[in-house]
Structure formats: C-alpha cells, structure tokens
Image (tube, rainbow, N blue to C red):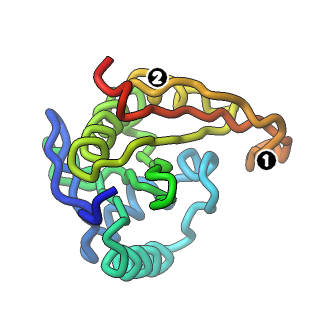
Amino acid sequence: MKPVGSRVIETERLIMRPLQEGDAPFIYKNWTSDPMVTRYLTWDAHASLQDTENYVRYKLKRNSEDPYRFDWVLVLKETGEPIGEMEGVRASLQDNLVEMGDAIGSKFWNRGIATEALKAFIRYLFEVAEVEKIVACHISTNPASGRVMEKAGMHKDGVLKGYLIDKTTSRREDSVWYSIDKKDYGD
C-alpha cells in the first residue's frame, strides 16, 4: 500500500475531494444531522452545527497526520455541494487491506451516486494506492448498502449473526460483509 492519501477524483456526477473546514455547514445539512443516514452508522446524528464543525476538525487533523488515510467528501457537480463522504475507516498495512465506510444524505439515495463513488474509490485504491483488498459491511436492515457493494463489483463473503444493534428497533441484527481483491478487479 502506498502512502498517497486522498487525491481529487472526478466521476460523471461527482468530484471526490479531501475534506475542507468550510464544508461543515453542508455536511451538517446534508448528512450528519439526518437520522435516516446515521441510523446505519456507528455514530448518532449531530445535534448542532458545532458538533459537525468538531467532527470536521477531528477528521482534518487525523487525515493530515496519516498518509494511509483515504477520505473523500462527495461533491455533486450539478450543485457544487458536498452530499456525502466515503473513506477507508480502517487500513491494515500488514494485510494491505482497507475497509470502506460511507455516508450519503438520504435525499440523494436511489440515484446511483453511492455506486458511482464506490467504483471510483475501488479504482483509486487498487490503481493509485496499490491496495490488495477492500472490505465493507452493512447492517442487515440496510440491504440497499449491499446492493451498492455488489453493483460496484464487491462479492458477499459472509454474515456475522447478531453482530450489530439496529438503532431504531434496538434489536440485534446481522452484519453482512463484502470484499473485492485487486486480482479480481475488472472481472
């Protein structure tokens, strides 16, 4: 894995770029305050813009200190506005592996944007960062996330039974895992 960090990526509808401090108001408006989005995340919806500003500062510091951090804001070309984020939430140098996590504002769901971004993420990590394997998971109550992973070329690897708690129902749900290997990329 190369320590290349996050460079600008352009897709048909998106500019995927590193986070900027001025992004906080859009991030708060479009996804961190949206309980429909954070229902499926490990963190809760932000109660205020200040929460998101703190989140942005934390991520900016963390990203500046680690060249193995792959973290993008997804900017919709049509509006120039950040609508989500995609990042390597965990990187293992020993295993040459990155785990992907994302959050996209609910008003931008079901448009193919997440798939477009994930395909670009995968291409960058394999072709630029020279990662060998990318993994991702979703809670079983969010099957749309699995469909995005499949459309981007990832394959379902397995299910961890009762691994996560659904924030809305407080019930234990399964964690569904997907991956793609560089050697299989493009097949």
Q: Which residue is pictured at 34% across the width and 60% down the height?
A: 71
Residue 49, above or below 113: below
Q: Closer to us: mark 2 or mark 1?
A: 2
Label 2 sits on a secondary structure element that is: helix
For label 2, the residue is: 150
Q: What type is the residue that disc 1 sits on?
A: Ile
Q: Quadrant of residue 120?
A: top left
Residue 37, above or below 67: above
How busy is the neighbourhood of tag 2: few (under 14 within 10 Å), some, or many (20 plus)?
Answer: some
Residue 131 pos. (x, y %): 36, 48
Label 1 sits on a secondary structure element that is: strand
154 or 9: which is nearer to us?
154
Q: What type is the residue that disc 2 sits on?
A: Glu
What is the CA distance from the residue labelled 2 to the residue labelled 1?
23 Å
Q: Residue furthest front?
A: 94
Q: What is the quadrant of the C terminus in the image?
A: top left
Residue 121 pos. (x, y %): 31, 43
Residue 36 pos. (x, y %): 57, 45
How busy is the neighbourhood of tag 1: few (under 14 within 10 Å), some, or many (20 plus)?
Answer: some
Q: Which residue is pictured at 50% across the width and 76% down the height?
A: 51
Residue 84 pos. (x, y %): 36, 51
Q: What is the quadrant of the N terminus in the image?
A: bottom left
For label 1, the residue is: 165
Q: Is residue 166 left or right of residue 14?
A: right
Q: Quadrant of residue 183?
A: top left
Sequence-earlier tag: 2 or 1: 2
Q: Which residue is pictured at 46% across the width and 75% down the height?
A: 55
Q: Which residue is pictured at 74% across the width and 49% down the height?
A: 167
Q: Is residue 150 left or right of residue 81?
A: right
Q: Is residue 101 visible?
A: no
